[in-house]
Image (cartoon, rainbow, N blue to C red):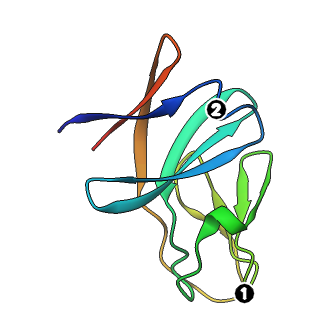
C-alpha cells in the first residue's frame, strides 16, 4: 500500500471537492467541514463524474440522477434503486500536503 500526494490543503478548502487521478483511478478528494475524505469519482448508477455533483455537509449528490453518497465511507446514502457503494480511501494530511493511501 503506497502513499500518493494529491494536493495541498490550501487548494481544497472546506466545502470543496477536487478530482485526481491516482494509480490509474479517478478519485474525488473532499473537504467536508475541515475533514478530508476520498472516494471513487464515478457514480455506480450511470457512470457520471461526481466532481460535477454537489457537496452538502458530508453527502455528495450525483448531478445526473441524484444518487447520494456519504463521503466518509463511500456508502450509498439515498437513491430510489439499489446501486453499489463507492470505494473509499484513507486520507492523510501532513503539514499542507494531502496524501491518499492506496
Residue at label 2?
11
Q: Quadrant of residue 48?
A: bottom right
15 relative to 7 in the view: left or right:
right
On screen, 92 above or below 43? above
On screen, 6 above or below 60? above
User: Which residue extends farthest top?
Assistant: 95
Residue displayed at 58% across by 72% down: 49
Q: Quadrant of residue 69?
A: bottom right
| Coordinates of residue 33 in the picture (x, y in percent) | 76, 31
Residue situated in front as seen by the camera: 35 or 82: 35
- Label of residue 30 in the image: none
Residue situated in front as seen by the camera: 40 or 8: 8
Task: Name the image quarter holding the N terminus.
Answer: top left
Residue displayed at 55% across by 40% down: 37
Label 1 – label 2 distance at C-alpha: 34 Å
Q: Which of marks 1 and 2 is nearer the N terminus?
A: 2
User: Which residue extends farthest left?
Assistant: 1
Pointers 1 and 2 in contact (CB under 8 A)?
no
34 relative to 82 in the view: left or right:
right
Neighbour class for label 1 at 10 Å: few (<14), some, many (≥20)?
Answer: few
Mark 1 element type: loop
Residue at label 1?
80
Neighbour class for label 2 at 10 Å: few (<14), some, many (≥20)?
Answer: few
Residue displayed at 64% across by 32% down: 11
38 relative to 13 in the view: left or right:
left
Residue displayed at 76% across by 78% down: 66
Mark 2 element type: loop
| Coordinates of residue 42 in the picture (x, y in percent) | 51, 72
75 relative to 21 in the view: left or right:
right
Task: Name the image quarter holding the C terminus.
Answer: top left
User: Which residue extends farthest right?
Assistant: 56
Give the label, 1 or 2, closer to the camera: 2
Amino acid at each position: 500500500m503506497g502513499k500518493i500526494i494529491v494536493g495541498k490543503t490550501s487548494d481544497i478548502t472546506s466545502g470543496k471537492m477536487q478530482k485526481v487521478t491516482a494509480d490509474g483511478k479517478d478519485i474525488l478528494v473532499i473537504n467536508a467541514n475541515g475533514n478530508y475524505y476520498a472516494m471513487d469519482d464515478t457514480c455506480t448508477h450511470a457512470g457520471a463524474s461526481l466532481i460535477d455533483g454537489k457537496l452538502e455537509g458530508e453527502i455528495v449528490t450525483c448531478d445526473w440522477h441524484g444518487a447520494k453518497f456519504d463521503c466518509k465511507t463511500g456508502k450509498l446514502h439515498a437513491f430510489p434503486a439499489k446501486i453499489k457503494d463507492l470505494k473509499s480511501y484513507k486520507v492523510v494530511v501532513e503539514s499542507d500536503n494531502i496524501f491518499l493511501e492506496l
